[in-house]
Image (spheres, coloured by chain):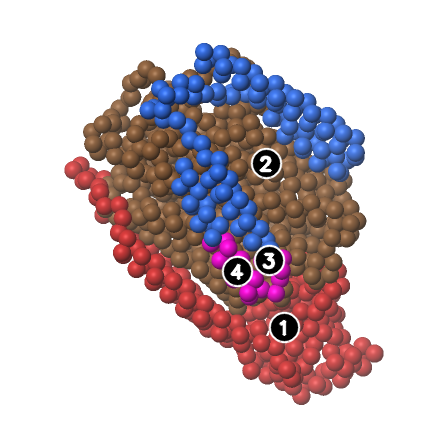
Amino acid sequence: MVDTGHEYHHLFSIYVPIAVGVWLAIALATGYGLLRYRRRPGRVPSGRHEAQVPELTYAALLVGVAAMLLYFTFTTESKVDALPRKPGLVLHVTAGQWNWRFNYPNGASVVSSSLHQRVMQVPTNTVILVKLHSVDVVHSLWIPERRIKKDAFPGADNELKLTFPKAGTFSGACAEFCGLHHAEMRFGVKAVPRPQFDAWLRVQAGASG
Amino acid sequence: MSTIAARRRAPAWTSVIGATDHKTLGRNLLIAAFAFFIAGGVLALLMRLELAAPGMQFVSHDTYSELFTMHGSTMIYLFVTPLALALGVYLVPLQIGAADISAPRLANVGFWLYITGGLTLESGFLTAQGPGKAGWFATWPLSTSGATPGTGMNLWVLGVIMSALGMIAIGVCLLGTIMRRRAPGMTLLRMPPFTWTQLVTALMVIGGFPVLVLVMTLLYLDRQGVHIFNGFEGAIDYQNLFWFYGHPVVYVMFFPFVGCALEAIATNTGRRLFGYRLFALSLLLFTALSMSVWAHHMYTTGGITNRYFAFTSTALLVPAGIEYFDMLGTLIGGSIIYRTSLLFGVTFFLQFLVGGASGIFVASPTLDYHAHDGYFVIAHFHYTLFAGSIFGFFAGVYHWFPKAFGVTLREGLGKLHLVLLIIGTNMTFFPMFFLGQEGMPRRVATYPRSTGWETLNTVETVGAFIIALAIVVFLWNVVVSLRSHVAAGPDPWDGQSLEWATSSPPPRHNFDVLPPVRSYAPLLDLKKAGEWPRRRELEETPA
Amino acid sequence: MRRAAIPLLAWAVLLTCSAVGLWIYSHSWLNATLISAAAALTYLIALGFVIRHRRMPDASEARAHPELSVRALPDLSFGSALIGIAIATMIFGAEFGLFLVYIGLGLLLFGVARLIFELRAERRALEEARR
């Protein structure tokens, strides 16, 4: 079962140290250059204006770094993008101005709107297939704790695989600017163990009618 | 060979309307762009005031949408893009030893399309329903007349079309100038680095900007009831069309400023640019890639091949790395004077790197699934565009101000300007990386108090006002310096390229005598051979 | 000067590589078409510079071609300003009415006429200066 949060963290822990390391290396080299080569009487600047072999070697190194980053990105992306053939739960999500409608298989639904932000529930340790679309403009379903989002378009479904390894309550937001109350188009996600979720779902179905 | 121009005695205001002298036209473009910068900056300050604390204190949701839309639109369409081209219009003929740009009248047509386009865009503020408010890229279907009705939004679309046409006209002139007007002996591989950046910029303008005109025309028709875009496919098509322009434009807003920074650095280290040939080659690769990466703005749409664009986007680090190598190669082994222009140039490279590294980060779709449409991305592009490019711009300003106006800018005020701007930009934009990581979406007028985002937002707001202070210091520097009576002379910095071989400011025809060009640092060659005076007044030789 | 077209050609080739990659990997015909169009446009521009290469004569040639030793540098062009404003007016007319499009068209004609006037005056001045 793919944990999108974990996959993100894995890639993050490759990219960020490299980025910070590169920045520090260049900043140090720049600082060194600035201080060591300050103009002094009698200092003649070097007439050497190219070093093809070192520079091309360095370029080859950069290609290697890019290739490595792409390898890690592609392997992670395969895991995150792959859609389950037999999901444990299919959740239909409809986005509109300015609310989220979470529709469950048994007819239950939870609506979180800009006026009434509500918490919907999901089972932990289950592969959830989200089928997402919009009834008007483009919105985007973002659950920051899961480190993932997907856009909701009018006219066709987008699909997103979600899993919640740990129980807890997390926030959700709309990430694509969708008009006046985009900022308030938020919702909550409460991940609970499956039996608890099933019980809640039965109650919701009764309530939704 | 010398050129003689027939002088006409005309009143000064005519040069604002009908200028075809590239120096006057370039100056007009620069001033207009800077005026739009102030306008866009005020909009940003208003946004930051609102965001400092949760809840809506000063503006309504509707107004906030107008603020961020017009801030982004003004800065991108009306400030940095024209600024990049304006520098080219002013400097390229001087750097290549030409008397003027190609087709100066076409450039003036472009100038007027830009001005009228800018005024049209901003005139939306005067309409009942307000100006454009669907974001600077006007995502369809939010930008339809149903979702965003009103004349103001229509004027926004038309304004974008007009100013884009203006930029295309100027880009065409720049390309023609570079291809046709170079001094004898100046092959393409002997052009100064700044002119090389203008060459590739012109190519991107010509290759990418027409698609903006196309997509905005289609959007306008769509808003009039002609069903151009439909459903999921239509929305994806809109984004593909828009971003095909939308990515090259950010490189148009980058390369000329790399050129500025490199020239300021090279001149003040007393050496020619290191690794010039690879630099020129990497520019071609860099810009060709920049035309090939656009759909990385669309990773979360599910409508494009993420991997292809991840590949091209990550590949950008190769030519970028080469430019950093060349910058370091120029510094190390040099004889460095800590002039304001050099300091701005070096800061550009260090701060842009934060933007560049975060760009490689979001080039990865899996990482972008979290970062997209959040404050991480806002941090990324403000580091590249503001903490990056604009620092390059100021490097160019301090470097070339004496050439254009005959007096240098004050070093003391310049360093104060630099320090304030470093503090301001980092204070404003660095915390945004963390806010994005925590889940703060972009384009939100407010955020829940429970998120705890208030502290960082307040810090950012303070930073924004420090930026404003830095700009005031800069403007003060300009005013005070222009009042100076100390002439800078033709070559105050011991320059390497042809623009320093003529008076400051240059005569109408730019050069009375063209020195021989044997490399990409022609004046440096002559100085080393003892054939050119160093930092002394040039005696005017008869034509 | 023909050699100057080489970087343009190189750029067009790089874009072509990108276009080929997109045709193979992308489901979207629009994407590949956009980049192919940019490549095609660059080839055309490069070709244009190869065909119509014309360099400003240098000092050695000036004696052989004395007529080229004098060039005209326009200082002011109200015609071009008018053309820019005219096009903008016509575009503005899309929003505020056909009458603006007509006014813009009229301004455009004035602008073009003024431009022709300026170009002819420039040519006359050049001929006089060369005599």
Stretch in magenta: C14-32
Residue at 49% across / 50% down in the picture? C12
What amino acid is found at the position of numbered circle 1 in the picture? Leu
Q: Is residue B376 visible?
A: no
Relative side of A36 to B206, left or right: left
Q: How many callouts does the rendering have?
A: 4
- Dot 4 surroundings within 10 Å: few (below 14), some, or many (20 or more)? some
State the residue position of label 2.
B166
Query: Which mark is in front, 3 or 2?
Result: 3
Q: Are marks 3 and 2 on the same chain?
A: no
Query: Which mark is in front, 3 or 4?
Result: 4
Q: Are marks 4 and 1 on the same chain?
A: no
Residue at 62% across / 80% down in the picture? A84
The front one of A209 and B362 is: B362
Chain that is blue in the image? C
Task: Look at the image and say whether residue C22 sits in the magenta stretch.
Answer: yes
What amino acid is found at the position of numbered circle 4 in the picture? Val
Element marked by disc 2: helix
Element marked by disc 3: helix
Name the main secondary structure of what is drawn in magenta. Answer: helix
Chain that is red in the image? A
State the residue position of label 3.
C31
Element marked by disc 1: strand
Whole-angstrom CA distance, mark 3 to mark 4, is 11 Å
State the residue position of label 1.
A160
Contact between marks 1 and 3 (CB within 8 A): the answer is no
- Dot 2 surroundings within 10 Å: few (below 14), some, or many (20 or more)? many
What amino acid is found at the position of numbered circle 2 in the picture? Gly
State the residue position of label 4.
C20
